[in-house]
Amino acid sequence: MEKLGRNNIYLIFIVTLLITSLIEEIVNLPFDYYATFVIEEKYGKNKKTPLIFFKDECLGFVSNLVIMCVIVLPLTALVLHLIHHTALTSFTLTNSILFTLILAVGIGVVMLIAMGLSYIVLNIQYKFTDLEDGELKDKIIYLMRDSKKKVKHIKVYNESKKSTGKNAFLLKMLWYREFGIADNFINENDEDELLAVLSHEIGHLKHKKNIYNYLRYIFISMLLIVLIVVLTHLPFFNKLYIYFLQAFNIKTLNILLLGEVIVTLLRPVMRMLSIFNNYVSRKEEYEADDNAVKEGYGEALIQTFKTLSSDELVDVNPAPTIEFIEFDHPGMYNRIHHIHQQIQEKNLNKEETYGQNDIQTYSHKS
């Protein structure tokens, strides 16, 4: 790497990143091929041809490469410049705050551009067409009647070209929102099941705590960056990094190796943050399910979960510890149990309302 990068820390980073990404892609390719043409084929889930498979793999690799070259590399070069020309031990409070803000904004920009690029790739892989005007479209629009944020674009994509998968999702990019509905879902599921899933997605729009999520993102970004700055000031860190350089016989600063050292040391903190984010995500999924119940599609949503669990070979009832640590969505069993509870509460509230109305009517007559 040092020879290829000519002992320049910027070139060393670029060469190392590109080579490791290519190696990772080559290593993962046979496993992805096996998963698609052996495992999925065994259960009748795959409709891809080898040509389509390799086309999708190339698109994914190129999109990742574009993100790295256009966004990640310039951002990293800026960070490298700050590190290389300003000793971490001499960071003033102002420099530390500036360093933190640059990284936080940079990460946000990377995420936004990655989302935009993913949308472009998705439209290359699938053909999206606007949902035709009619009763179904009118019902979908009606579901958004009391939502402040509307979805103006409702599209159907040809999932049947590649698999038997059934999906309906809400794509959000800044002010642009779009419903994507797999043609398999429309052709093979009841209309109420589709409306149940879209009610769930609209529930995310209604309950989306944008300010809270932005503050949470800023807090986590600041926390990680502060931890990195503190960590790199500790005496043992330099000794550990020098040990890694000697172990790999490296003489020039390699930012990727430095990053691996930092990530390894911060892994317990990252795990705790991941558990917290998963908890928040599961809570938001329950809130979105509640909206489907409110719209009268609770039973249809349960039926959809049962169908999808069977079609997608999902573990419907993972161990509680595994779900708590790893899952950003509740297990199907817990979601169905929660929906049943919400339906019962809704019916009970209706009965109480009817009872009160009867009492008021009787009193008025008397």
Image (cartoon, rainbow, N blue to C red):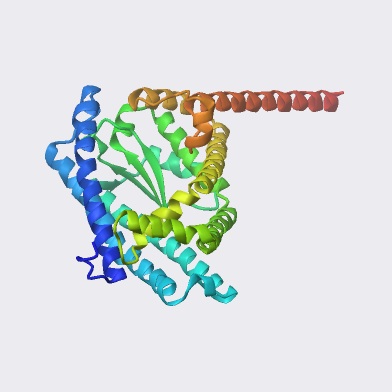
Query: Residue 27 lies in what quarter of the image?
Result: top left
Q: Nearer the viewer, residue 278 or 257?
A: 257
- Quadrant where the C terminus sits is top right
Q: Is residue 121 left or right of residue 288?
A: left
Residue at point 35%, 59% (across, down)? 245
Residue 252 located left or right of residue 282: left
Q: Residue at x 28, y 71 (%)?
A: 8
Q: Position of residue 9 (x, y in %)?
A: 31, 69
Is 134 left or right of 52, judged from the image as shown? right
Q: Is residue 154 visible?
A: yes
52 versus 317 height, above or below: below
Q: Position of residue 299 (x, y in %)?
A: 50, 24
At x 16%, y 44%, the residue is: 54
Front position in the image: 138 or 33: 33
Q: Spot the residue most to the right.
A: 366
Residue 30 is situated, as x and y percent measured from the top left of the image, at: 19, 37
Image position of 354 with respect to 212: above or below: above
Residue nearer the viewer, 69 or 206: 69
Please indicate whether residue 311 sits to the left or right of residue 140 in the image.
left
Height in image: 302 above or below 219? above
Q: How many marks?
A: 0
Task: Give percent across and percent down for residue 345.
Answer: 65, 26
Is 33 located above or below residue 310 in the figure? below
Please identify the quarter of the rendering in which residue 135 is found: top left
- Is residue 127 visible in the rendered structure shown here? no
Q: Quadrant of the N terminus?
A: bottom left
